[in-house]
Amino acid sequence: MKRTAIIYILSIFLFSNSFAQSLKPLYENPSAPIEKRVEDLLKRMTLSEKLEQMTQRVIGQNNNASNAELDKRNYSPLTGSFINFSNNPGFANEIQRKAMKESRLGIPVLLGMDVIHGFRTIFPIPLAQGCTWNPDLTKKSCEIAAKEATLSGIKWTFSPMIDVARDPRWGRVAEAYGEDTYSNSQFSVAAVKGYQGEKLSDKYSISACLKHYIGYSLSEGGRDYHASDVSPLTLWETFMPPYKAGVEAGAQTLMSAFNDITGVPASANYFTLTEVLKNKWKHDGFVVSDWKAVYQLIDQGFASDSADAGAKAVNAGVEMDMNDEIYVKYLPEKIKQKEVQMSRIDDAVRRILRVKFRLGLFDNPYVDDIAEASRYLQPESQKLAEKCAEESMVLLKNEKTVLPLSDKIKKIAVIGPIAKDQVNVMGSWTCNGKSENTIGLFDGLQKEYKNKAEITYTKGCDFEGTDESDFANALNIAAQSDVIILCLGEKRGWSGENASRASIALPEIQEKLAAKLKEAGKPIVLVLSNGRPLELTRLEPLADAILEIWQPGNFGGNPFAGIISGRLNPSGRLDITFPKVTGQIPMYYNMRPNARSSMKDWNGLYQDVKNDPMFWFGHGLSYSNFVYYDLKTSKTTFTENETISIEVKIKNSTNVDGQETVFWYVSDPVASITQPMKKLKYFEKKEIKAGQESTFIFRIDPKRDLSFVDGTGKSILEKGKFFIEVNSQKLAIELK
């Protein structure tokens, strides 16, 4: 009887639960397929509710001067998305609770934030991360950023920025992964997979956002927000591949750019947003505009007023309007006038809802409210941040093997505005990072050389200005030292958004300080912290060694000191070229060959400066010496359906373990569309122990590695001779 009663009660419970579930709308059923849930919800929505989903507003305290906003508490529960500048999970839950409980349909909010290179644990800027040539580090750093963001209620980041950046005057070069298309593609995939995890609905996954789509980094003269004159060939050859790679990796969202693309602004460009992204690449997520970029269509001369701007943006393929209220205010009238079709609105909302369902927001909209100490700066996060900083640092010069410092060095002078800095070394876009968590360069050296050497410090000068009052003291300290570690660089606000500069040289006061310290007659180790390549034509001759540390985030001090002492072996290689002078820009490794290049005196090059840059893309020194030899191929002739292997052996001829990055370049000397002098097609980084050798292999798929595109994006593979180049060694192969 007891068993029968239990079965009866259980049956009643299950029936009641099933009956109650059947009374709920389909979109609230977590076991139903996402597409069916989307369609069920969409058909229940009013036009007003749909347009609210297409609207992003701002809430919380904003820390970006370019986007200044007050805290907004009286927000609509219908709002589709907020940029949330609070890191308080309780506040995030308050927003979600209002959306879920005070709106008719209970649609959760998508909370986003600019999590660019870390949330609270701040990693090196992306330009530095590209110099690691280790995408796995970027993937892991994005995993940590995603977890910290999620624990604060953020489920969407406006990252990665994969604009191929070749103009150091452009401030946002700091946010890119360098000047090469292929490497940007690899880091694009790594970042997307890091943010989004194995499954988008996982607890610590957030949605990635590829930006800025597209051609933004080609803004004329490096001036932010300006027009980009992008030829069809350049669009497909240079700018499209990283975005395509990110879309194929599963990126749920993209951000339309501010720039005008050869007459049609990126935020109203039907060709790029719909014909390519949606129709050709089959992207089924959504596009959000950049900050008030829809309104900027008026400034750009493409729209007559806000209503016209809204219609043109949404018709082109921008689903969500970031913070200018244009869609919600003006699209109803445009729909009445049939200038915007309801089918376009439905498609936009469908895409937004799809991402929210995939993120699991409908079923789990709230976040656990746990203490900050358990959310941020975990030991494994700090360890990874140090590793990322270590591998991003590039030894640019090392005359007479000044570095690593000899054990005989007993007095070290540390001078310069960066030496004790804890703010600017974090870089731009530091999200919720705090300077008090930063381990500075001086801190790292003190720890590294405790009981080993005497370290003295003076600032010498500020980042800018004309105050030379500390020069004499700096020279006195330098004269009494065995070596000078001179720490110069940029403020964090000198790169990033709205931070274009006509000259990429450091301010004159810093160059003057270096010249004064040269009078001490002691070796100078120049340490640079910056968010872009710098003009070093006057500083380079003064330095015996140059270490580029970029803006390494919170935890650059210890790996910096480890490289100085030799505890760590530098392995960073440049992902962007350093010109000698600003006037050489643009200068990048894969330019096309020029006419008269074979003529000594009539080659069209600059007459007033040597034409090579200061440091080429891929440059970087090590404390190990790597010898390349025995470059060979499995076949010298082959067909388009064959895969061939090229291999090279590399020996570490020193007694120091080191990591080497091998860059495999392809050149196509004769083609129906002229090709860059060489193109990076593969890279690999491995540790080679002291005295040992390793074999690196590049497997060539002709259709992937030897083809090129035309101005329509069509891939072309032509028969003929190609050259494979690795570390200045060349090998000829032929496609039959």
Image (tube, helix red, strand yellow):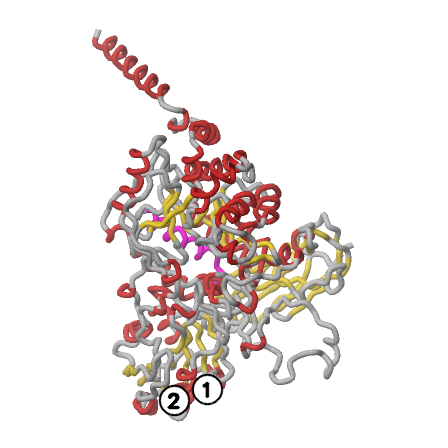
Q: Quadrant of residue 421?
A: bottom left
- Bounds of the magenta segment: 131-150
The image quadrant where one finds the C terminus is: bottom right
Rendering coords of residue 248 (x, y %): 55, 45
Numbered tag placed on residue 517 in the rendering: 2
Residue furthest to the left in view is 2
Label 2, secondary structure: give it: helix
Q: Is residue 98 above or below residue 411?
A: above
Q: Residue furthest top?
A: 1
Instruction: Please tell me how many numbered marks the rendered image carries.
Output: 2
Q: Which amino acid, by three-letter code, is at mark 2?
A: Leu
- Quarter of the image with the N terminus in it: top left
Q: Is residue 360 left or right of residue 250?
A: left
User: Upstream in the sequence, badge 2 or badge 1?
Assistant: 2
Disc 2 versus disc 1: distance between alpha carbons?
9 Å
The image shows residue 489, relative to residue 171, as above or below, that is below
Circle 1 residue:
542
Which of these two is toward me, 218 or 439? 218
From the viewer's side, name the closer residue of 260 and 665. 260
**Residues packed near mark 2 inside 10 Å, few (<14), some (14 to 19) or many (20 plus):** many
**Residues tagged 2 and 1 counted as in contact (Cβ below 8 A):** yes
In x, y percent, where is residue 105? 36, 31
Give residue 724's position: percent from left, percent from top. Answer: 67, 63
Secondary structure mainly formed by the magenta segment: helix
Residue at 40% x, 93% y: name it.
519
Q: Amino acid at mark 1?
A: Leu
Q: Residue at 40% across / 63% down in the picture?
A: 124
Of residues 530 and 690, the one nearer the viewer is 530
Q: Residue at x 70, y 78 (%)?
A: 604
Q: Where residue 140 sits: x, y (%)?
A: 41, 53
